[in-house]
Image (cartoon, rainbow, N blue to C red):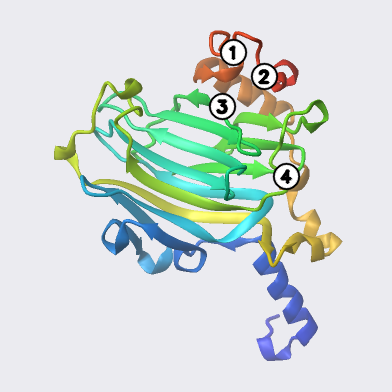
């Protein structure tokens, strides 16, 4: 049975509208994002809003950000990275608030010479403090096809995921004095820019501009998240049934996920701040001593 909008009670229409607005922003880049730099020539929204591309040339990179800010949720984006010789380039995809004491949850993809793997760089900032880097190689070529990169952010933990496989968990340890991103709404940002002073082999390999323009592509954005507007979270007004649909709110790692994250960290992790004793001669950060999955 189908209904036209005119036959639905107005209160039901309002409920459906609020649920759609507050819990799921999906797909269309025109509706969900603004180009922030690089102009229309470098940041292009194509196919009726279903595809977005960022380009980098010698004059400028490009970037975009979400129209909405979020306070907890699950964010998914499919990305196909710069192919070929991408040395010196960095493609970013992250959540961040504003100000000197900002919170931030980072995916950064550090380019490399043709045939060498990308480095996936992750970090978490809370109250302006970062220095929580973990880096990974990927178990596939991220330039050949689109892959899904996800951030699950709830009050208990942050989970970084690649193709629905967890690669990193940052748990809420405020109880032992470790700040956690819990009260600053964050927007989604992404950019493609030149960082050849540090991105590839510590800056030893520079960007080869004969390969420009460099291009990364984005599609299938999905935000099942709490939209922050006018100093209020949209999730505060949702019904119990609506909240039950938000599995991210208490998402943790089950047995299968614990096996997957062990596999990733054992085989593909190439840097972990929690094991860098030279960097922290006075002792590792407190979360490193308590976290089961570093």
Q: If you read the primary sequence from the N terminus, does the residue marked by circle 3 or circle 1 appear first?
A: 3
Report helix, strand or loop for mark 2.
loop
* Residue 4 visible in this rendered orientation of the protein: no
Toward the bottom, the furthest residue is: 6
Toward the front, the furthest residue is: 100
Which residue matches tag 4?
182
Report helix, strand or loop for mark 3.
loop
Q: Nearer the viewer, residue 95 or 165?
A: 95
Which residue matches tag 3?
131
**Label 4 crowd bin: few (<14), some (14–19), many (20+), radius 10 Å:** some
Residue 289 position in % (x across, y down): 72, 15
Report helix, strand or loop for mark 1.
loop
Q: Is residue 161 left or right of residue 202?
A: right
Q: If you read the primary sequence from the N terminus, does the residue marked by circle 1 or circle 4 appear first?
A: 4
Which residue matches tag 2?
285
In three-dimensional space, the C-alpha distance between marks 3 and 1, rounded to whole angstroms, equals 11 Å
* Residue 117 visible in this rendered orientation of the protein: yes
Q: Residue at x 49, y 50 (%)?
A: 189
Which mark identifies residue 280? 1
């Amino acid at each position: 049975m189908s209904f036209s909008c005119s036959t639905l009670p107005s209160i039901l229409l309002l409920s459906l509208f609020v649920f759609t607005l507050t819990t799921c922003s999906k797909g269309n880049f025109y509706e969900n994002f603004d180009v922030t730099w690089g102009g229309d020539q470098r940041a292009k929204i194509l196919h009726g809003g279903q595809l977005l591309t960022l380009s980098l040339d010698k004059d400028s990179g490009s970037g975009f950000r979400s129209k909405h800010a979020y306070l907890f949720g699950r964010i998914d984006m499919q990305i196909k990275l710069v192919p070929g010789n991408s040395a010196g380039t960095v493609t970013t995809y992250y959540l961040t608030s504003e100000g000197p004491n900002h919170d931030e949850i980072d995916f950064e993809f550090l380019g490399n010479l043709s045939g060498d793997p990308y480095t996936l760089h992750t970090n978490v900032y809370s109250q302006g403090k970062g220095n929580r880097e973990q880096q990974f190689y990927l178990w596939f070529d991220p330039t050949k096809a689109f892959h899904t990169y996800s951030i699950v952010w709830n009050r208990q933990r942050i989970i970084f995921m690649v193709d629905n496989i967890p690669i990193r968990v940052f748990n809420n340890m405020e109880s032992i004095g470790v700040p956690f991103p819990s009260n600053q709404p964050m927007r989604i940002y992404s950019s493609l820019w030149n960082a050849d002073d540090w991105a590839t082999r510590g800056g030893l390999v520079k960007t080869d501009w004969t390969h420009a323009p460099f291009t990364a592509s984005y599609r299938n954005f999905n935000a099942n998240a709490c939209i922050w507007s006018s100093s209020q979270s949209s999730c505060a007004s949702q019904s119990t049934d609506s909240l039950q649909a938000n599995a991210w709110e208490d998402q943790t790692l089950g047995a299968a996920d614990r096996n997957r994250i062990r596999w990733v960290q054992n085989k593909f992790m190439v840097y972990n701040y929690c094991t860098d004793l030279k960097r922290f001669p006075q002792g590792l950060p407190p979360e490193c001593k308590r976290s089961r999955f570093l």
